[in-house]
Image: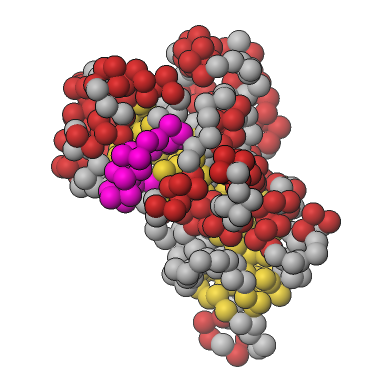
């Protein structure tokens, strides 16, 4: 399908300079790819490559930009949204979450992932880095709805589980154009040393990055030091796990050595301020990392701990919490945070063709309704998005050249009310 967006403000994010410049013009898609980004075309019919659009959309001055990238989540935890709130992380995780997750079936995860995808679409999130059980079900839900999903390995326990990781890496990186896979394990505190050594071996064999939960709480770091005499990051470095990149989710309790390892290895620190705030895990040193030149991206974490899959809220929390932590209103400016949310997440996940709006890139984009009170006046669109923006401003979400959400309506192959009903039946059963 060929679609023309015209009368648009466009934020391509396709330059390597700081800032979020905006152009006025139009954008065309051809199938799954972007075919044109540039100035208005006065006579479209006169240009051979622009002929025969299936649809032409007058943007009426609204903003076209790359979709947000949720660089850490557990999508199917939608069944636990608002279930076990207001508890410390360890009690929440081991006493409330793990026991109920043990009862999940593949069919459950398929439906619950679809529910999360619907929420992603309403918030302009065009891809996510999903770490959860039953990866076949997650991948099926993504493909069936048309959603782009990067899967993250989530093994734990003993060394024998490395076989699962290797098998999934090869399977899901040859599964569907919407699906990719990165090596990963749950966390140091749920994974044996033998398995971590096997993960390091797989990383070297595949020349592939590795991702995991890292230094989310003070307790996690302290207990890792008791077991291994070093922080999780230092342990992973010593095991040879970081030679081909990767990163960590949360990265709240980092010391100077941890940050130096991340900088030197070119790793990604994915901050999750909503979840870390709600679970009182702490405030990640994002500004300190930014000053060091560490790669930064943003994730929501799962809907059991957040409980909202909303990158607008995460963006505000990233900058707001850093201003409090550093006692400096100038740190983590809106433009840098917006780049973390819309561009960097794609690079962290390995989605190098979905990071910006340029010819030949994937047509993963959103339209932001600027004709709403919270977007006016247009002193700075980037600041409006970070400081006053909300899901209500997302007018349209396109992934791989297909519009999956527009003006409050979903185009994902299943009625929303059916997904809601099935999700509630699962939650009722597991409660």
Instruction: Note whether residue 3 is visible.
Output: no
Does 122 sit left or right of 77 as displayed? right
Q: Quadrant of the C terminus?
A: top right
* Image position, residue 57 (x, y; %): 70, 68
334 is higher (above) or lower (below) than 12 = above
Q: Nearer the viewer, residue 152 or 271?
A: 271
Give the image quarter of residue 275: top right
374 is higher (above) or lower (below) than 47 = above
Magenta-drawn segment:
246-268
Instruction: Count all numbered tags in the image, as a single digit.
Output: 0
Residue 258 shown in magenta: yes
Does 358 sit left or right of 51 as displayed? left
178 is higher (above) or lower (below) than 272 = below
Residue 78 shown in magenta: no
* Image position, residue 161 (x, y; %): 25, 23
Q: Quadrant of the N terminus?
A: bottom right
């Amino acid at each position: 399908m060929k679609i023309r967006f015209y009368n648009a403000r466009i934020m391509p994010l396709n330059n390597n300079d700081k800032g979020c410049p905006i152009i006025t013009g139009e954008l065309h898609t051809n199938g799954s790819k972007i075919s044109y980004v540039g100035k208005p075309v006065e006579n479209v019919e006169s240009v051979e490559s622009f002929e025969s659009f299936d649809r032409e959309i007058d943007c009426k001055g609204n903003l076209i930009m790359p979709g947000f990238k949720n660089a850490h989540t557990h999508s199917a935890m939608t069944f636990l949204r608002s279930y076990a709130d207001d508890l410390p992380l360890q009690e929440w995780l081991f006493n409330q979450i793990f026991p109920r997750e043990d009862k999940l079936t593949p069919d459950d995860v398929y439906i619950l992932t679809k529910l999360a995808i619907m929420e992603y679409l309403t918030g302009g999130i065009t891809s996510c880095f999903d770490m959860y059980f039953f990866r076949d079900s997650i991948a099926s839900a993504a493909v069936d709805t048309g959603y782009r999903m990067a899967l993250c390995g989530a093994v734990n326990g003993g060394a024998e589980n490395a076989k699962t990781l290797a098998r999934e890496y090869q399977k899901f990186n040859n599964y569907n154009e919407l699906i990719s896979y990165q090596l990963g394990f749950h966390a140091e505190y749920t994974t044996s040393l033998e398995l971590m050594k096997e993960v390091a071996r797989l990383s070297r064999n595949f020349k592939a990055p590795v991702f995991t939960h890292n230094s989310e709480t003070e307790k996690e770091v302290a207990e890792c030091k008791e077991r291994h005499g070093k922080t999780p990051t230092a342990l992973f470095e010593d095991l040879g796990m970081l030679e081909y990149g990767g990163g960590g989710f949360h990265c709240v309790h980092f010391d100077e050595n941890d940050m130096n390892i991340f900088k030197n290895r070119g790793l990604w620190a994915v901050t999750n301020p909503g979840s870390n705030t709600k679970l009182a895990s702490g405030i990640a040193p994002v500004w300190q990392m930014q000053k060091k030149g560490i790669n930064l991206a943003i994730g929501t974490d799962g809907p059991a701990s957040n409980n909202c899959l909303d990158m607008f809220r995460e963006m505000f929390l990233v900058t707001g919490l850093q201003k409090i932590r550093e006692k400096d209103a100038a740190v983590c400016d809106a433009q840098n945070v917006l780049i973390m949310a819309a561009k960097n997440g794609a690079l962290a996940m390995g989605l190098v063709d979905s990071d910006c709006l340029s010819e030949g890139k994937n047509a993963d984009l959103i339209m932001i309704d600027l004709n709403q009170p919270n977007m006016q006046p247009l002193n700075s669109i980037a600041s409006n998005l970070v400081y006053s923006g909300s899901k209500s401003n997302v007018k349209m979400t396109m992934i791989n050249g297909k519009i999956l959400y527009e003006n409050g309506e979903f185009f994902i192959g299943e009625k929303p009310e059916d997904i809601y009903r099935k999700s509630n039946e699962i939650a009722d059963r597991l409660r």
